Image: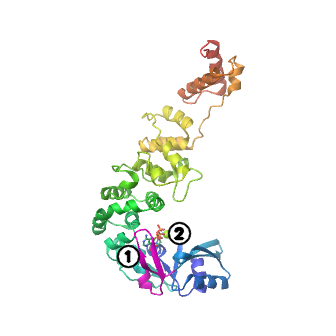
Amino acid sequence: MADAWQAMGKILPEGRMAGGCVRDLLLGRAVHDLDIAVPLPPEVVMARAAKGEMRTVPTGLDHGTVTVLVTTASGTVPVEVTTLRRDVETDGRHAVVAWTDDWREDAARRDFTINALYADYEGQVSDYFGGLEDLRAGRVRFVGVAKTRIQEDALRMMRFFRFTARYGQQVDQEGLEVIRELAPLASTLSAERVAAELLRLLAGPERNLQTILEHMVSTGILDSWLGQQRPQAVPGTLGGALNKALEVPGLGAHESGPTLLRLAAFAPDGQAGAQLKLSRKAQNFLQALQVPLPQAQSTAVVRPALAERGLAAVVGRAVLEQWPLVALEALAVEPVPTFTLTGRDGLAHGLAAGPELGQALKACRQWWLNHDCQPSMEACRAWLAEQAGAGRFST
Ligand code: ATP
Ligand code: MG
């Protein structure tokens, strides 16, 4: 990251690091994206990059954003370079922007004071709206008049809670009151934007997550997305083995097993995935978490259920119902036993092909599940032979 920053200084010395990366650097937190703001139009940024032999991707030219691919010792780092902007017009969902070379104007259109900081190549910080002081005090405060800023873009209500969860010492009462008043505007947002913010909030490790979610619910901003649900207990950070057990391949951006698990706990009526237009995989996963399981906490019950319904769904359910996590951690890392008898085994024991055979195998599988998946294949064969011999499957 530091290498990429230095390299950018060579081609765009008039640029400044902007937004989240400045905030996180000042707090000594890990910085995952490098965003640079420049008082130059995108064409100039692309020309400078070309001259410096760096590749560019026109990721959002309409918004003035060019991604510059910087080669460093540790690989290629994508750096987002955005032209300074000022708002010309906003309708609550889309903004029409114009380029500017005025840093303060660019800062004025950012959402919160702590997100409106810049740092130049000398490490000099520019703070136009008191962001440094708010950062120190753990205050998430809108730049300008909260009401106007939310009317310009209602997503800022969701972002208010996400950043409060991460950086807030307490919830800013003024912001909260305005959000209460403007909550119905949340219904006009696109599902994709709401989902991204909500999932990013749910993905966080913050201990105050539950409190923040309760505040969100109390304002009503989620009503049109998740129904008028009551705040439910959301599982906290899971252990390594549980996280592993909840790995779901093929999920979309911001989606992950543990995040979806929290969503399922928070909005248990099963509609959230469709409402938020999550990926098909995520929706299936949320559906699987709805499968009711016996309340029993013994491994004798959980284990066959694991085998039967797939690991992730069961672990998820177990966490929701607050089964003892320690026991589950042990379970989650064990391979799940599978039932391997086939039709051929049935035929070998004198059963006729057809519905009878299917029923016999199903019964055998149930018997195996009832015995905690312990019986070996031989034992299952023996049971099948015994039952078939006694005529239990004949129609
Ligand atoms: P994170 O570490 O979670 O990515 P971030 O501050 O980088 O935090 P982003 O959503 O990536 O947050 O946005 C980058 C910056 O763009 C913000 O810091 C903020 O200055 C500005 N920004 C993003 N979305 C909005 C918005 N809806 N309204 C105003 N400013 C915004
Ligand atoms: Mg970011």
Q: Residue 324 magenta-drawn?
A: no
Residue at 56% in and 50% down: 248
Q: Nearer the viewer, residue 182 or 295?
A: 182
Provide the residue designation for mark 2.
32
Q: In terms of secondary structure, where does tag 2 sit? A: loop
Residue at 46% in and 72% down: 24
Q: Is mark 2 within 8 Å of ligand 1?
A: yes
* In this picture, residue 129 sits left or right of residue 25: left
Range covered by the magenta-colored residues: 83-106
Q: Position of residue 119 (x, y in %)?
A: 47, 82
Q: In terms of secondary structure, where does tag 1 sit? A: helix
Q: Nearer the viewer, mark 1 or mark 2?
A: 1
Residue at 42% in and 44% down: 320
Q: Position of residue 384 (x, y in %)?
A: 63, 20
- Tell me the kind of residue under disc 1: Thr
Q: Is residue 189 above or below residue 65?
A: above
- Tell me the kind of residue under disc 2: His
Q: How packed is label 2: few (under 14 Cα within 10 Å), some, or many (20 or more)?
A: few
Q: Is residue 29 above or below residue 336?
A: below
- Specify the quadrant that holds the C terminus: top right
Provide the residue designation for mark 1.
113
